[in-house]
Amino acid sequence: MESTTLIIGASGQIGIELTMALRQQHGAQAVIASDIRPTTDTELLQGPYEVLDVLDKEAISACIEKYNVREVYLLAALLSATAEKNPEFAWKLNMDGLFNVLELAREGKLDKIFWPSSIAVFGPTTPKEATPQHTVMEPTTVYGISKLAGERWCAYYHQRYGVDVRSIRYPGLIGYRSEPGGGTTDYAVDIFHKAIETGKYSCFLRSDTRLPMMMMEDAIRATISIMEAPADSIKERGGYNIAGCSFTPEELAAHIQVEIPEFEITYEPDFRQAIADSWPSSIDDTYAARDWGWKSKYDTALLSTTMLREIHKKKAPSTVTHH
Ligand code: SER
C-alpha cells in the first residue's frame, strides 16, 4: 500500500485548508482527514475521513496501520481564548495529544510530524517589535505555556530519539474557508464576515492593538514547505518564527473602508485584551528565510481585499438560489 499522510484536527481553521492543499498535491486517497466529530463538509469527504480522538493513542496507532500513514500533521488543540476558560483540559489536550504522536514516532510508526506552535509562546517580557527567534519566553496564557512546553518536547524527541518533528510559530491566521476557532486574533477573521453581513463590527480588542497576522494561504505554503525541506536544513527543532503582516483593528478597519466606506467599527475590549497585550506586535523570521526559504506574499492590503472578495463569492450563490 502507498504511504499516506494523516491530519488530526482536519475540521479546524488550518486543518480544512491543509487537507485541501495536500490532497490537491498528492491525491485525495493519500491524505486521511480526521477529527473528534463526524463531518458533513464536502471537501473533507472528498477523501478518507476518520473520527479520531487525539487523546486515544491506540486509536491513532490503529489508524496509522489501517492507512499506512507515515506523516502526521497534528492540529487538534484549544486556542488561546478557549483555553483560558478551561485551563486544565487545554493543558491535557494540547500536551497529551502531542505526546501520543511523538511516542508513535519514537516507536518507529511515523517518519515525520508537523506540530504547530504559536506567537503565544512569547510573553510580556519578550521584546515586542521584530521579536527574534531566540529571546525571552515567559508566556502568561495556558495556551502559550502548552506551546512553549510542546516546543521543548519536540526539540527533546528530535535530539534524544531522532524524531523528525517540525514546527512553526504561527501568527494570527486569517482565512475565508473556515469559521474562527476561539483565538485572540480571530477578531480579524470575524470582522470581514460582519463587515459584509451588517456593515458593523464590535471588536473585543482595543483599536491600537498591533498583532502579527498572516493570510491562511501563506500559512499553508509555509507548512508544506517546512515539511518538504531536507531534514538537515531544519536547524530549529522547537518552532520557527514566521512573519506575515502586522496590523491593529483600526488599521484593518481602514482597509475594509476602502471597499465598504460605510463600515463602522466599535471597541469593547474583554479578557482577550490581556492575552493580546502579552504577545509581540511583529516577528523577525530571518531563521525561517535562511533555513527553508520562507517568504510571505500577503501584506495587509492584499489580505483585506482577498478576504472581502472571497467571502462575497461564498455568499453570492446562496443569494441567487433564494431569489
Ligand atoms: N491565533 C492564535 C490565538 O489567538 C494564536 O496562536 O489563539
Image (cartoon, rainbow, N blue to C red):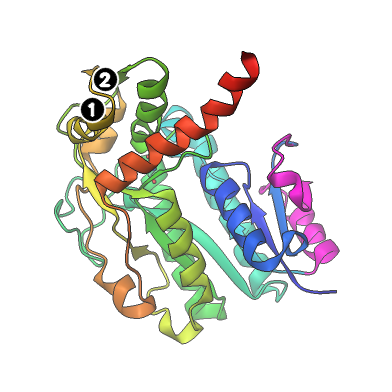
Disc sitting over residue 263 in the figure: 2
Can you give x and y, in whole percent of width and height, for residue 297 in the image?
A: 33, 59
Vertical side of 181 occupied by 70: above or below: below
- Dot 1 alpha-carbon crowd within 10 angstroms: few under 14, some 14 to 19, many 20 or more: some
- Dot 2 alpha-carbon crowd within 10 angstroms: few under 14, some 14 to 19, many 20 or more: some
Disc sitting over residue 74 in the figure: none
Can you give x and y, in whole percent of width and height, for residue 256 in the image?
A: 27, 31
Amino acid found under the numbered disc labelled 2: Phe
Name the residue rendered at 42%, 64% in the picture.
152
**Seen in the image, is 239 located left or right of residue 76?**
left
Query: What is the spatial separation of the Cα atoms under label 2 and label 1, in whole angstroms?
Result: 6 Å
Foreground pick, 248 / 169: 248
Name the residue rendered at 65%, 71% in the picture.
105
Pointer 2 and pointer 1: residues touching (CB < 8 Å)? Answer: yes
Can you give x and y, in whole percent of width and height, for residue 6 in the image?
A: 69, 59
Foreground pick, 259 / 143: 259
Name the residue rendered at 39%, 23% in the picture.
196
For the magenta stretch, what is the residue range? Answer: 39-68
**Which residue sits furthest bottom?**
232
Vertical side of 172 occupied by 252: above or below: above
In primary-sequence order, the first of circles 2 and 1 is 1
Q: Which residue is mark 1?
A: 257
**Seen in the image, is 224 located left or right of residue 245?**
right
Name the residue rendered at 43%, 49% in the picture.
216
